[in-house]
Image (cartoon, rainbow, N blue to C red):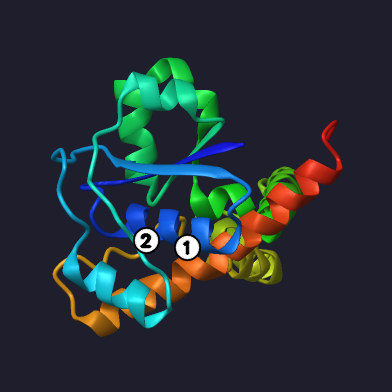
Amino acid sequence: MNILFVCTGNTCRSPMAEAILKDKFPEVNVQSAGVFAGEGQRANRHTLATLQENKIMLDHQSQSVTQRLLNWADVVLTMTTQHKQSLILEHPSAQEKYFTLKEYVSYNDQLIWEELKKAYATYEDERSQFIKENERKLDSFRLDEAVTEHFAADISNIQKLESSLINYDISDPFGGSVEVYQKTYTELERYILLLIDKLKHQKETPDH
């Protein structure tokens, strides 16, 4: 399995992700790159300090995303939705490989989306039926009020589901203190551990 992590400049988040995955799951091949990276730059000093604090060493030189790298990768995991969109625009031929890291591993979020789709569909059906039954009895203002009141619980449930959806972006520590970089490390580690679980499961069940 060849995994490519992508961020903006390939000096903070994606090399950190690469180093964490290499440390915790050396069975996979992993590289990192940036959508706007300079060539041959070292990782940010706070990135290096944070990794050292967590007993992970990193020897890194930045690189840009290239078609060669995309051809090499089985899956391309971006740090943000914007990075994913940039890749789709610049390299559309490989877009079936592109996911944000969180999107790729967040099974719970997929379940919430399924619940939301059902809740939206049910709400729209029942709302249409309610309006049909009451549009001749009430003027438009009172009908709007009645809809809001009648479906208050449904709307509240939809809002609750929407608020529990994941923000698919890994926070950008650039310009922050070492403590900010440590928070990004903690966030990355959480999702990389989920990634490792997924990779192990795929290895055990290759047909799925």
Residue 174 image point, x, y percent: 19, 65
> On the rendered structure, is 78 left or right of 192?
left
Neighbourhood count class around disc 1 (C-alpha, 10 Å): few under 14, some 14–19, many 20 upward: many
Residue 200 drawn above or below residue 164: above
Pick the front one: 103 or 63:
63
Residue 131 shows in this picture = no
Label 2 sits on residue: 16
Pick the front one: 112 or 32:
32
> On the rendered structure, is 170 left or right of 160?
left
Question: Within the image, what quadrant is residue 193 found in?
Answer: bottom right
Residue furthest to the top in view is: 93
Helix, strand or loop status at disc 1: helix
Residues tagged 2 and 1 counted as in contact (Cβ below 8 A)? yes
Helix, strand or loop status at disc 2: helix
Residue 205 drawn above or below residue 174: above
Residue 172 drawn above or below residue 95: below
How far apart are the two marked residues, 2 and 1, measured between alpha carbons?
6 Å
Quarter of the image with the N terminus is top right
Disc number placed over residue 20 in the picture, else none: 1
In the image, what residue type sits under mark 1?
Answer: Ile
